[in-house]
Image (cartoon, rainbow, N blue to C red):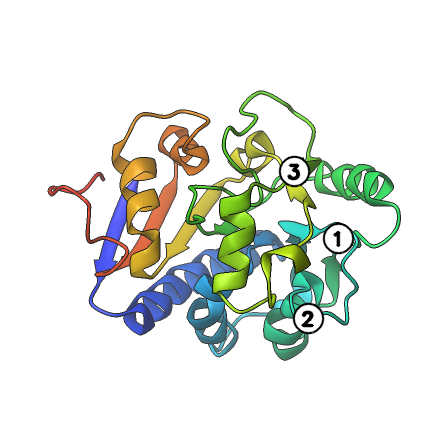
Amino acid sequence: MNVNVFETSEQMGKAAAAVAADILKDCLRQRGAARIIAATGASQFGFLAALVATPGIDWSQVELFHLDEYVGLPITHPASFRSYLLERLIVPAGINRYHLLDGETDAAGVCMRAGELLAQAPIDVAFVGIGENGHLAFNDPPADFETETPYLIVELDEACRQQQVGEGWFKSLADVPRQAISMSIRQILKSKKILCIVPDLRKAVAVKACLQGPVNPFSPASILQAHADVTVFLDNDSAAMLTRPLPN
């Protein structure tokens, strides 16, 4: 695991975007195509904006998979991750091949169909974050580290739901759905490369537990320690509790 700490979240986002762009360009040069997984949420704003602004990426040859989405939430809701990806990545980049998770009606069917598409070829790079409770995608603690099922319907814990209120996506805890579709832990780990982008002081406790604590389901993102090619991008705030020297 390669951990990089930057003074500001803006610097962090630009650095992560530069690495992501190099990975994508390399895939496009070698194979003429790239398959990616993209996270959403406030933590990814700067990174995605910088990535979309990077020249020289043929986005028409990039295939995008969705990391997670709420069950029962319409795409017109401000918190919809489908809407988020369309607005912040798919439309401005010009991605033509994308697979969004529609959790409004048949969530189980969506999990099955998206999983079948995902299994057709390896994922080149996954862009992920770490939740305030240590979640990876919407795999809240204690996360399932064993299932090979690509997408799951999961129950969201109160800490996860409260984070969504704190970030301004919902007006109250009662408004946050209790279930979501999430890519499974083992499916995320099948990605060839993982870039983990985590700004903000409110993530510092989870970052410490997941990067320097033991690998265990109660700190779901700690499983990233077991992957062969993970690069973590932090700002000074999110790295505030880490013990130096940092893992690499």
Coordinates of residue 146 in the picture (x, y in percent): 57, 20
Q: CA distance from mark 1 to mark 3?
A: 16 Å
- Label 1 sits on a secondary structure element that is loop
Name the residue tied to disc 3: 155
The kind of residue tagged 3 is Glu
Sequence-wise, the earlier of marks 2 and 3 is 2
Q: How packed is label 3: few (under 14 Cα within 10 Å), some, or many (20 or more)?
A: some
User: Which residue is at 46% across, 44% downward?
Assistant: 193
Name the residue tied to disc 2: 86
Quadrant in which the N terminus appears = top left
Q: Quadrant of residue 206?
A: top left
Q: Nearest the camera: 54 or 58? A: 54
Q: Nearer the viewer, mark 1 or mark 3?
A: 3
Q: Are marks 1 and 3 in contact (CB under 8 Å)?
A: no
Q: Nearest the camera: 96 or 67? A: 67
Q: CA distance from mark 2 to mark 1?
A: 12 Å
Sequence-wise, the earlier of marks 2 and 1 is 2
- Label 3 sits on a secondary structure element that is strand
User: Which residue is at 75% across, 50% downward?
Assistant: 71
Q: CA distance from mark 2 to mark 3?
A: 25 Å
Coordinates of residue 69 in the picture (x, y in percent): 68, 53
The kind of residue tagged 2 is Leu
User: Which residue is at 46% across, 34% downward?
Assistant: 220
Coordinates of residue 230 in the picture (x, y in percent): 38, 42
Q: Is residue 34 visible?
A: yes
Q: Quadrant of residue 165?
A: bottom right
Name the residue tied to disc 1: 101
The kind of residue tagged 1 is Leu
The answer to whether residue 170 is above or below residue 124 is below
Position of 124 compared to 195: left or right?
A: right
